[in-house]
Amino acid sequence: EAEVAQSPRYKITEKSQAVAFWCDPISGHATLYWYRQILGQGPELLVQFQDESVVDDSQLPKDRFSAERLKGVDSTLKIQPAELGDSAMYLCASSPGSGNEQFFGPGTRLTVL
Amino acid sequence: AQSVTQPDIHITVSEGASLELRCNYSYGATPYLFWYVQSPGQGLQLLLKYFSGDTLVQGIKGFEAEFKRSQSSFNLRKPSVHWSDAAEYFCAVGAEPNDYKLSFGAGTTVTVRA
């Protein structure tokens, strides 16, 4: 069964360092999402891609976060510099198109010390 | 903007007993509603969704949910829980089927005791 892949699964970093997360969506899925899930809360959408284009990044803290999906397949989310408040689970999801079921990856748990 | 409230942070239920998780939404028009489950260290898996039609929706793993417009609710139920149902459950609402932006509730953690 096809799955969304994410790496790393866990990342510990010190504040002010740069971190990057990678996501490989299900093959053929045009839409890719990055979510942030703070402990005890539901996921919050950070950015949505349709193919290689950003559709919505209104909740992405652009002063420190960036996301790209250069070839419309896999995607990278970067944080530079990391802050203590960035500690969270970062989830990637994909879907065949807007409105369809979103398939989630296992997430990357980030701890910023 | 739409929003979701899950009033119960944590529920403990005995194996074999019934389970009901509450979800209340806020949205001015017809909402599109989802329930997801998240096992420890895992991503979210869709249990069921409601877009229109029959207000009682059947999902995977023996779960069902009922949409009640008058109560702005979409409660999740299972007649008999198994130990493997221990997980965190999230209700989510979208504005329309093609609105990618889902708003999630804070989740309900379910513990199953033997």
Image (cartoon, rainbow, N blue to C red):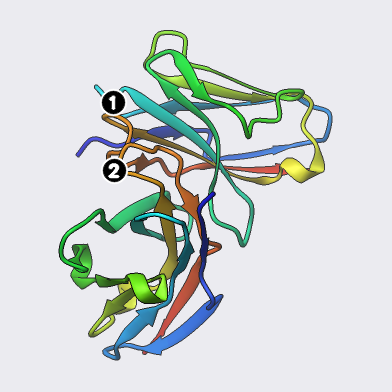
Q: Amino acid at mark 2?
A: Glu
**Left or right: A112 as drawn, with respect to B111:** right
Q: Give coordinates of residue A103: x percent, y percent.
A: 33, 41
Residue at figure coordinates x 24%, y 22% from the top left: A28
Discs 1 and 2 lie in a common subunit: yes
Residue at figure coordinates x 21%, y 68% from the top left: B55
Q: Quadrant of residue A59?
A: top right
In primary-sequence order, the first of circles 1 and 2 is 1
Q: Is residue A113 visible?
A: no
Location of residue B36 with respect to A91 vertically, above or below: below
Describe the element under mark 2 as helix, strand or loop: loop
Q: Give coordinates of residue B33: x percent, y percent.
A: 35, 57
Location of residue B81 with respect to A68 vertically, above or below: below
Q: Badge 1: how crowded within 10 Å, few (<14), some, or many (20+)?
A: some
Q: Is residue B42 visible?
A: yes
Residue at figure coordinates x 40%, y 8% from the top left: A71
Q: How many marks?
A: 2
Q: Amino acid at mark 1?
A: His
Q: Which residue is mark 1?
A: A29
Q: Give coordinates of residue A42: x percent, y percent.
A: 54, 55
Which part of the image, by quadrant, shows the C terminus of chain A?
top right
Q: Badge 2: how crowded within 10 Å, few (<14), some, or many (20+)?
A: some
Are the two marked residues, 1 and 2, in contact with CB atoms closer than 8 angstroms? no
Q: Which residue is mark 2?
A: A101
Location of residue A88 with respect to A42 vertically, above or below: above
